[in-house]
Image (cartoon, rainbow, N blue to C red):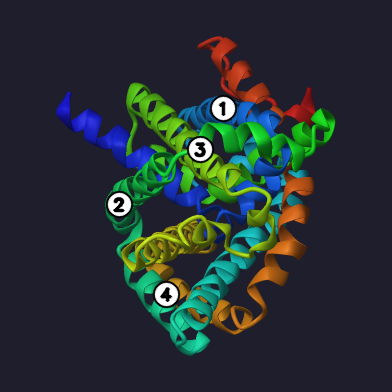
Amino acid sequence: MEKRSVGAFQIGAVFIGTVIGAGFASGQEILQFFTRFGKTGILLLFLTGVVFSAVGYAVFYIAERLRLYNYKDFICGLYGEKMAILFDMVITLFLFIGAAIMFSGSGALFSENLNLPKSMGIAVIGFLTLVTVLNALDGVLRINSFIIPVTFSIIVMVFAANALSGGMVRSIELSSRYCSGNIAHAVLYFLFYCAYNLMLSLGVLTALPRKFTSHRTLFQGAVIGGTGLMLLGMLINLCLLHGTPDVFDYSIPSLFVVKNYPALFRIMIMVCIWCEIFSTAVSNIFGLTVRLSSGYPHLYKIITILTVAACMPFAFYDFKRLIAFFYPIFGALSLALMPCILYTFFKLRQRQPGKKKLKNVFEQ
């Protein structure tokens, strides 16, 4: 039982570490997708826990039942071979660009907050990502099992500090003056948020059932991951609402909410942001390497080195521009993914034992 619990925690930690990254940790992603919608955003953030848990488990279930342990095979199982080629190219590009954005985020953090060369920030995260991914899935599990509890602790402390400063409830009530009440707009952004984060997580999520075959463990891990993401997002959102309207003027709103607190708090937040950037970079590079080395396992280490090296030049592009340009595209192209995953999941659950092949959605 204890071993199963550890496995569920590791799965949940990897799930959280794969989703959170530069945009999430800096607060900018939560600000754009939820804080700007006030109380509606709070409700939708609760729903992200349900969506991530449900769709995350559906991915685990499909991958384990059909033995689809990389995102190309997984997409092929969902959409068929003809569409799989297109989706494979899109996801591969997503993971590559996502890793480059994380590297760029590390460089931006070093240059803007530590007054160190951007190249140093890129080199540090590149080297540590390479070392971690060379240890394959075990390396990804270990790094997230350490980073996520630390991240949780720091965010809880920041939330507690904001709450104890007084006026948080009143600030949240008054924030409605500065937030949009457009429900349709808010729901669309909520769907974008869930869709592109799940799309970018496929590389790691599909690999986990190879190591963890117990459906109960996978289910518990999905719930831990989905609930953890919701709680982290909620705490950050409440802190940002406490800082409205000024918080909308900052590129890294997470640092704004602690600007009047001791230097230790600001350092903790910077460390937290960098660790989350690092965890997402590791997950993206791992998912990309697993896909590219599919059928050539003996080349895993060489492909890992080449993949990290290829991301480095793109990391020198402006961090904010990369996010502003690519994230909306990720969301739009990912919208069809969630309903298809859930459809395939329910089809598998209803499948008769004697049937050997599950038709994908394009073969119905």
Q: Which residue is at 47% across, 49% downward? A: 204
* Circle 4 or circle 2, nearest the eye: 2
Estimate the spatial distance between the alpha carbons at disc 2 and disc 3, rounded to whole Å.
27 Å
2 or 3: mark nearer the eye: 3
Question: Residue shown at 43%/81% (left/top)?
Answer: 114
Q: Mark 2 points at which residue?
A: 150
Return the x and y of residue 345 as percentages of the image width and height. 59, 22
Alpha carbon distance from label 3 to label 1: 23 Å
Q: Which one is nearer the viewer's eye here, 91 or 121?
A: 121
Horizontal side of residue 277 vs 272, given as left or right: right
Closer to the chain start, of discs 4 and 1, is 1
Q: Earlier in the sequence, mark 4 or mark 3?
A: 4
Which amino acid does the dot numbered 4 rest on?
Ile
Nearest to N terminus: mark 3 or mark 1 = 1
Disc 4 from disc 1: Cα separation: 32 Å
Q: How many discs mark residues in the rendered view?
A: 4
Marks 3 & 1, CB-CB < 8 Å contact: no
Residue 211 % position (x, y): 33, 41
Depicted 321 relative to depicted 231: above or below: below
Residue that badge 4 annotates? 125
- Depth-wise, is mark 4 or mark 3 nearer the camera? 3
Question: Badge 2, how many Cα within 10 Å: few under 14, some, many 20+?
Answer: some
Above or below, comparing residue 196 to residue 169 in the picture:
below
**Amino acid type at mark 2:** Val
Which tag, 2 or 3, sits closer to the chain's start?
A: 2
Image position, residue 316 (x, y; %)? 61, 83
- Nearer-N-terminus badge (1/2): 1
Q: In this view, does 11 lie to the left or right of 47?
A: left
x and y, in percent, of residue 325 in the image: 77, 64
- Most foreground residue, 23 or 176: 176
- Residue with the mark numbered 3: 167
